Every structure is written in C-alpha cells, then in structure tokens.
Amino acid sequence: MNLTSLSGAGFWLGALALAGALFALQRLRVRHREVTVVTTLFWRDALEETRARTLMERFRHPLAYLLALLVALLGWLSFGAPIADRDDGSDHLFVLDVSAPMAVGERFEEATRALIDEVRRTDRAHRHVVACGSRLETLLAPGEDELLLEERLAAVEPEACAPGVERALLVLARRAGEDPLLVVHLLGDAPVRTEVLALLGDRTRVERILPAGSDAGSQRVAPAIVDVACGPSASGLDRVDVWARTVGGRTDLVLVDGADRRTPTTVATADGRTLFTFEDLAGDGRAVTVEFEGPGAEPLRGRAEVVLPDRRALRVATVADLPTGLEMALRSNAGVEFVEPSRAEVVVRYVGDDFGGGLPALELSTADGDDEAFVLVHESDAADPRSLLFEALGDLGLEWIDGDELATATGRAIELGERVGPVRAFRLWAELCGSGGAFARDAAFPLVVARALEWLSGRADPHWIVRAGDPLPDARAAFEPNGAESTAALDPVGGQLVPPRAGLYRSGDGAVLIAAGPAARPFDDAVTSRDAAAPPSSAFDLANLLLLLLAGLFVVEWNLVRRGRMP
Amino acid sequence: MPTAVTDPAELLDADFLDALTRLRIVARRVPRGGRFADQSSQALGSGLEFKDYRPYTPGDDLRAIDWNIYRRMGRVFVRLFEELEDLPVYLLPDVSASAFVETPPRGRAGLRAALALGAVALGQHDSVGVFPFSDDLRIALPPSAGKGRVWTLANAMARIEVGGATDIERSLKRFGAMRLRRGLAVIVSDYFDPRGIEALRAGLRHVRHQVLFVQLTRPSDSRPDLEGDLRLVDCESGSVCDVSVTGDVVRRYREAYARFEGELMDVARKRGAGLLRLDVEEPVVPQLAKLFESGTLRV
C-alpha cells in the first residue's frame, strides 16, 4: 500500500506524534466539576476506577488508549489517501517522454501527474523512472522515495528534440535482463513501431499510460513545424526561397521578417504534411521566423527561426596587373563585384603590397619567396594548425586539385602551409595563376579561387536546416556546440552526426546549423494504451473503507462509553 | 450552628393540626409503670375494662371481690381490670448536614413528620420526647405529656441546631444508655451513615424500644441526575470522590441504592418495626396517613 498524500516517513512521524499526543491526553487529569452531594456512599460503591487519567499515576486504561489510537491512526491513514500497492513481482520501468511534442499544451504536466500517481502505486523496490529526451536520465532509481521524483521532475521540461523512446526502449530492455518480467510504462506521445516492440522479447511488456482527462489518447497530431529549409530562388542569384513543412493540418503559417509578416506563396499537402513556400526573399544573411498565426506558436513546435544564406555579390578589389589566369577566373564569377578598395570585402594583391590595407586578401607569392605553393595566413596563433589545414582542404576545395600534375609541371613539391599574420590571407604562387600556369589549367582552379574569396570574406555557408534526430547531410562536418542549448558531441572521425536537439550549432569556420523542430509520427504507434488510474478514485476505495472502519470504531467507543465499559 | 427553622410556625399550622386529629397511635401493650392514659398496659389495676379473676389475698381491695362467684362457689375471687397507661414516644430526628444541604431540605420534612407523630401522641395523652441526633444524640425536649404541649414541641424542634456528620450508631447507643421507659422510638433520618446500614444495626442493639423508621427520601436518591466528569464532595465529611458518570456507573449506583433500601427494610422487618419512606418533596401528612391504617398506627 502506498500513500498518495503522505510519504512513508511522514506517515510514521505523524502516527508517532498522534500516539504521543493521545498518550499525553490519557495521562492528563480530568478537570472535574465539583458537586456537593448528601453522601458519596453509593457513588463509591458504584464507582469504577476513574483515576486512570490523573497525571503521574500509572497508566490504567491501555485498552481505551489503544482504541483511541486506532481511531486516530485510521483517520491519519485515511488522510494519507492510501492506494493499493502494485507488487506483482515484475519490474516497472516508467519512461517519461520529454521530447518537444510534450511541450504542447498541458501534455507534459498531465504526464508528470500521471507518472507520480503511477509511481506511488508501485512497489519502490521494483520501479525505475527515466526521462527520455535527447538523452536518457534516471529520475528515480529502484528503492528511492517518490518525494525525490517530485523534486527532480521540477527541474525537467520538454526539450527541443525528437522523441527517442524507441532508442531508449532498446537500451533499457537490454539492461533489464531476462528475469523478472519488465513492464515498460510510457508517458507521452512518442510512438513506437511494431518492429521495435518485437525486438524487446517476451519478457518485456510495453504499455502507454494516458493521463486522466487528457485527449492524448485520441492519437491526435499536434500542429507542429517539422522542418525548414532555404534554397536559391528563381527570381535572382541574390534571392532565396524558404520552405517549411508542418503536421497537424494547420495552414496559417506565416514568415515573420522583422515587422513584415508574409503569407506563403504556395501551400501544398501531401502524406499528412503541409508544405509552405515563401518565395523571393533577399538572401542577405538575416534571420527570419516561420510561425503559426495565433495560438500554438510555441518555440519548440510552432515557431522556427532560419538564417537566410547571404547570396549578395562578393565585393572584391584587385591590383591592376594580375596574372591572366586569375584575372579570368575572377571576371567569370558572377558572384563577384569589383569595387574600390574602400568598399571591398576582400582584396587580391601581391605579397608585400599595402593594397587594401587590413582587409582579408588573396595574395600572390612567388615560388622563390614561399616554399609552400599554398599558404593559409590566419590572425590568431591559437588555432590548431593541423585542424586549420584539414578544414581548408574541404572549405577551399584544395582536395580537388591534382597535386601530382602540378608538381610535375612546376618541378616543385606542392605543399600546403600555414602562417600567423596580421590579416587573414590565402597565398598561392603567382606562377600557378598565369594563363599557361599548371594550376590555371586545372578544372578546379576557378572553384578554388571562388571558394577562397568566400572563405576570406568570412561569409558562412548556407545554413543547413535539418530535423533534430536526423543525421547531418555532410558526414565530415564537425560542429562545435555553441550556446547553452547546444551540447551535441562532435564527430571528428567523420561518422554521421545526429544532433539530438534543436539549436544553433557552429563549426570552426563559422558555418551554422539550425536543427529545426522534431518530426511527429504518431500514426504507426504499436503500443497499447491504458488510462491512468485516477488517484482520487483509486485512493477513494481504500480511504473510504478506512473511514467506514473508523466510523464503526466510533460507534463501538460510543457504545462502550455509554455502557460504562470505557472512561 | 444554624437552627432547623427560624419560626416554629413553619412546622406547625392549623391545617396541619386539623389533619392530625384523625390519627391515632395504638400500642399493643405498653410496659407498666406509666401514668394513666389511653394505652393498654401490661399492668392490671383499676381500669374500666374487665380483664381476669384471681383468688383473693389479704390486702386486696374489698370492692374488687366478686360476690356473685362467692355465692355460687363459696370461694372469694377478685376482679382484675386492665390498666390504661401512656405510651412514651421518643422522636429522634436526624439533623445532620446531609438533611439540610438540599432544597427543599429533607430534614425539614423530617421534622414535620416527627412533629406530626408527636402531636398525635400528645393528643392521646402520651408523653413525647425529642432527641435530635447527628454525630451524637442531644435532648431537645424531655418526655412530657399534655395536649397543650404541641406548641412546646414545635418550639423545641424549631430550636434544634442542625449540622455535623451522621453517626447513627453512637447516637442510638447514647439513646439506649438513657434507660428511658420503654416506648416508641421514631427514628427520622436518611440513614446516610458513612458506614451504611451496618451502623444502624449496631446502634439498634442498644435500643430496647419499639422502633418506627421514617426514611427521608427524594427521587434523585434512586435516580441521580448527574453527568459528566464530577468531583463529588460529601456534604458532611468533605471527602471527595472523582467520578466520570457513565451509564454503567449510574446503573451501579442504582443497584447500590436499591441494596441499601433492601437492607433497611430487612432491619425493620427483623425488628418488627414499621418503615415509612417519606418523599420529602411531597406533602408530609398525606404520606403519614398511609402509615395509619384506618387512622390508627399500631406499634
């Protein structure tokens, strides 16, 4: 039996206090009303012992005390709202879903209330409570008091992550071993597929607890933004389109761009999802927000921020006598605008020139001046040179260069080096960039030049927008968490990185990833559901039984007092 | 100490006296040695009612010789007549504190009952004495006769000082030690001696008189209307008794009281005495009248 209104320690402390108080009351002297009578002769004959309650005399009415104590304890126990203990010999694992869908409405609060009630009804030695969000967290270990659960739940809230209950089930079911039977109680909407349940085996049973009074059992899909993406727009090179997909059937998604609220250009529905297209936005790197109109625009589900790619032309200033090959590569790049040095973001010059002052520069060196054909100059010596060079291979496209051919053509070893300098720069031999230069003839030359300019400008790559819980599209991307929300582990060895929760992720060179809201797939749920036993009603029976017993004892006591069997 | 009443008229009035004129106390046989009165005595003398014959002896009154017998039988016999003497009535009212603590005080009804019996006795030329008692016996009025002494009797009763504990054994022992002429002792009391009926039994061993018990009762004696946690204080001894009055305690009380009444009746029966239970909350004379069969109380 568990108490819903009192802890075990609280009950026993209260019972002890009641016993002590009643004992003291039994020992207190009765304040008698003084009456003068003609004789006490017959009263003395008739008198039972009434000195039991005089202070400092021996305790003479243990049975009366026990009856009073029983009455008081029954009342106290009834106040504790006892409920029958669930002790069927099996282990009970309560999995509280704290993924983003639980942030909608009162779902999380209802689930936690149901969880507390269910846990109280379960034998403490056989219960285990975990929160399942971006990671598994034990909220109550076997044997711990449920008061700890309430305390720990106060610090738990839904995370911006996809439901991970299936992964948790696989992990926890393995941990459960073979005996005894493991009953997994799911609290939340996280769906579980049939094939996952099949992996759990016969010794594990999964059920979903539907909080009393909630409509979670209707398998409804809460309106939510599933993912958001950006892409080039047909209306111009510097224009972008934004796409957002939602579930739940709402069609009132808008794009908030500062004070401007734009409605979607097109709305299409397919496979239970609605695709909204917002066309022809200026690709200038600013952040915009898509959200539902009116209620339901919660940050995790009904609102998502996206940073638009900066697709404006790169402003470049060059010295007059550039090698022909390089000159042609620059001129052919539609994304480059030649401007005066004062307006430039990047300058192209020879090493040693002061053209452009402190701006990032694509610098031309000579084979005699530099040993390395390509040199990365960075401002801070704090950066890890090996990491910098490694990233440069991908960021600048140097990996696409045919180094052997260049070495053969120049008769020099083609090497990549790094320096620390006052401004950011990318140096390469001028000899490689002439019209007849080996590098200028390489198919990767214009790409390297273009990406070098972008790298120098510091403009971030177009933001990848993926759903939390899905792997990143580029397995080699290694991101460093940035900000309090982002705690994703890096994956420097090149494995797939699955950002566990939504947030802002920044790579070493400034690339940004926004992991959008989680997906909702409630339709393939294979878990059977049951209503949570409402604590008041379940406690009602036992408490009422106690109250009836208490009333019966009162009648007995009243009768005994009337008959003079009890003082 | 306070007196029983402030004015004798509270005990005596015309209606009271008028109601008593129809009552009479008749003794079966009074012991000889008394004065001439209305009661048949054990003595044979010069009364009016013929009783027996006996042979003449020198010195007998010649007027008592029955000459008709002499003529017929030739022997001389004298006629004997029943001697009429008085019945000494000793009134022993209980004037202890218990008799005067309630309202109305049961002692006052007891005094009226004693006065009534005394007035009846005086009315038939019997002598009446008053011996109030509480923790000891006192003499309020020595035995005396005379119809005109009713007021004196009332006055003596009104002056009786009341209070003190009840010691019935000691009082009766002292009464017996007075060696009074045998008569009728009327003990008017609630009999609430701390030692119970046993004290009465012990005291009566010293009393040679005919006894009439008048028990002063009230309804609350047998059905107490107390409840709750009480400290009962004995009005005479001051001793306390803490009691939580419950149904069972009351039941036991009533059993104890019934036992007490049964013992008192048993004492009266064994003594061949009368017992009158007088409800002090009801008029006295009508209750006394029930004691007098056809207006006569035979003792």
Image: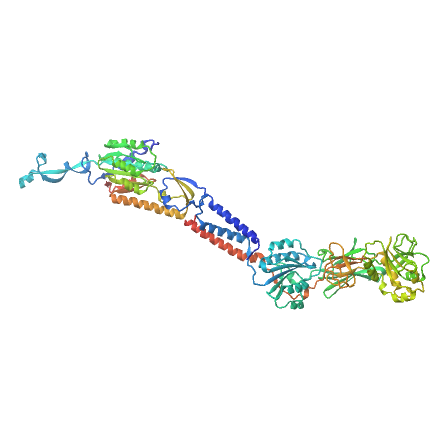
Question: Nearest the camera: A278 or B174?
Answer: B174
Q: Can residue B93 be seen in this view?
A: yes
Q: Is residue A273 above or below residue B87?
A: below
Among the 4 quarters of the image, the one containing residue B79: top left
Q: In this view, does B12 lie above or below A563?
A: above
Question: Nearest the camera: B285 or A274?
Answer: A274
Residue A296: x %, y % from top left: 71, 56
Residue plotted at (66% across, 61% down) = A189
Residue B33: x %, y % from top left: 18, 35
Image quadrant in which the C terminus of chain B is located: top left
Residue plotted at (90% across, 65% down) = A407
Most distant residue in the right direction: A321
Image quadrant in which the N terminus of chain B is located: top left
Left or right of A361: which side holds A471? Answer: left
Q: In this view, does B42 lie above or below A551?
A: above
How many dots with numbers?
Answer: 0
Left or right of A339: which side holds B202? Answer: left
Q: In this view, does A512 lie above or below B97?
A: below
Residue B56: x %, y % from top left: 8, 37
Q: Is residue A280 visible?
A: no
Among the 4 quarters of the image, the one containing residue A523: bottom right
Among the 4 quarters of the image, the one containing residue A466: bottom right
Residue A217: x %, y % from top left: 64, 62
Chosen colour scheme: rainbow
Left or right of B208: which side holds A186? Answer: right
